[in-house]
Image (cartoon, helix red, strand yellow):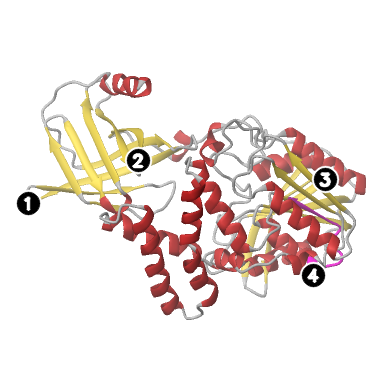
Amino acid sequence: MLRQLITLCLFMAGIGTATAQDITGTWYGTFSTPQGQQQRLQLQFEKEDGVWTGEMLSPDITPEPIEIDTVILKGDSLKFTINRINFKYTGAWGIRYNGYMGYFEQVGNRAALNISRKEIKEEDVKTVRPQDPAPNQVYDVQDVKFVNKTDKVLLSGTFTKPAIKDVHPVIILISGAGQQNRDNEILGHKPFAVLADYLVKRGIATLRWDDRGVGESTGNYDSSTIYNFAGDVRTAISWLRQRPDIDTNAIGLLGYSEGGVVAQIVAAGDPKIAFLVEMASPGIDGRKLYNSRLVHTAAAYGEKDEYINAYVSSYQRYLNVLEMEGDPAARKKRAFAELELVFNHFGDSTNKAGQQHFIEEAYEADVRGEALSLLKYDPEPYLGKIKCPVLAINGEKDLLTDATPNLKGIEKGLIKGGNQLVTVRTFAWLNHLFQACRTCSAEEYGALDETINPAVMEFITRWVQLLY
């Protein structure tokens, strides 16, 4: 109640009466996501035959605008809705702000959103974190390019090494799920830039690159599988083995989250890999991992066990379709039917626009090459072939890759294959990004200043240094 009163007071401050504004043209605003990140919105309005129309763009998310369904301009108030994404904006003209001050509601959440004619550029919302590397470092930083000739993909990245003229051990940093840049950037944090900075200052070189279709790297990310990404890593290894400043007997892999799966595939097929670091990486099969994340998502919203069990159960026929139906057209038709049942049972079945949005978004995400290949992935056969030293670590409060089953799965698979060089560690009160956390939910990631807990980086470094 107190929060609502404070929000109301803030909303009313600076609001005055005014005649209806001419909203034709472009408007700009920012809002704070539940994760604490500032994101931009651009709105375009025009009037045709006495009716206001418009579209909204989220330039930090996608270059594609989305059509606004209804616009109501009356006196000093502005309201508009986008049914497809369950978005409703309510604002009033703020005299001192010279724009509309208000809020939007979406899927039961409310966030402040003020819009004005003043353009908001990308640099205006950038966040600088305390652990971000300082410019003009005392080590060597090189922009590099190498080509995966099999898939005809150009990969652009950053190679860092100590300034001392010598050969150095090197760690290849492999990013997690989704299109990531070379810094594995998320919500204003740059984990790989921070990790590379820490390692190189302690004598360990690193190589990281933009995923396919990101930055200066070419290729189609959506159609690429975990096995294609493994090919990119093999290309990076070949490139490193040609460098005179690298100890070719000390090339290791570090896979973060789903990047750990890619690292498993590569290490299983290359006995020359010197060591492997798995950070919050899957040690259970893809379907179990998918179900585990459904459980944690529902639990994070405070749902009870009975609801969670029913929620997870409702997805199983859909997952069967994804795993077993080979024909794309038939798979889509059957998957849509199963997702409709899920939405109607757990959502508002009368909201047809919301239903369609849920179905399309869920299916599109799950049939991308990476997601579908991960769903069908079983780590055990690959772990059994890895003979190099392995460090597997997890945050105790990781809600995406549950520490206990995944670390046990990695350890069990390695030992079953005869590998005794296994170190497993769980870090108390760290989340999926290895940040010291309070609620430890994904909504908190961007609100935390810490990018990677220093104890984690020290542990990785000392483990590698013991090897060399």
Label 3 vs label 2: CA separation?
Answer: 47 Å
Q: Is residue 81 left or right of residue 51?
A: right
Identified by mark 3, the residue type is Ile
Residue 268 visible to the viewer: yes
425 in relation to 232, above or below: above
- Report, in whole angstroms, how far the alpha carbon at label 2 lies from the one at label 4: 48 Å
Q: Position of residue 415 (x, y in %)?
A: 85, 60
Q: Which mark is residue 49?
A: 1
Mark 3 lies on residue: 204
Alpha carbons under labels 2 and 1: distance apart:
34 Å
Amino acid type of the residue tagged 4 in the rendering? Gly
Q: Earlier in the sequence, mark 3 or mark 1?
A: 1
Question: According to the image, label 4 marks what residue?
Answer: 269
Q: Residue furthest front?
A: 306
Q: Could you tell me how far apart the alpha carbons at marks 4 and 3 are, in whole angstroms?
A: 24 Å
Q: Which residue is mark 2?
A: 108
Q: Give above or below for 216 relative to 121.
A: below
* Of marks 2 and 4, the one in the foreground: 2
Q: Secondary structure at mark 3?
A: loop
Q: Which callout, 1 or 4, points to the residue nearer the camera?
A: 4
Q: Nearer the viewer, residue 254 or 234?
A: 254
Instruction: Say which label, 1 or 4, has the lower sequence index.
Output: 1
Circles 1, 4 touching at the beta carbon (< 8 Å): no
What's the residue at 66%, 63% (across, down)? Answer: 285
Identity of the residue drawn at 39% across and 54% down? 63
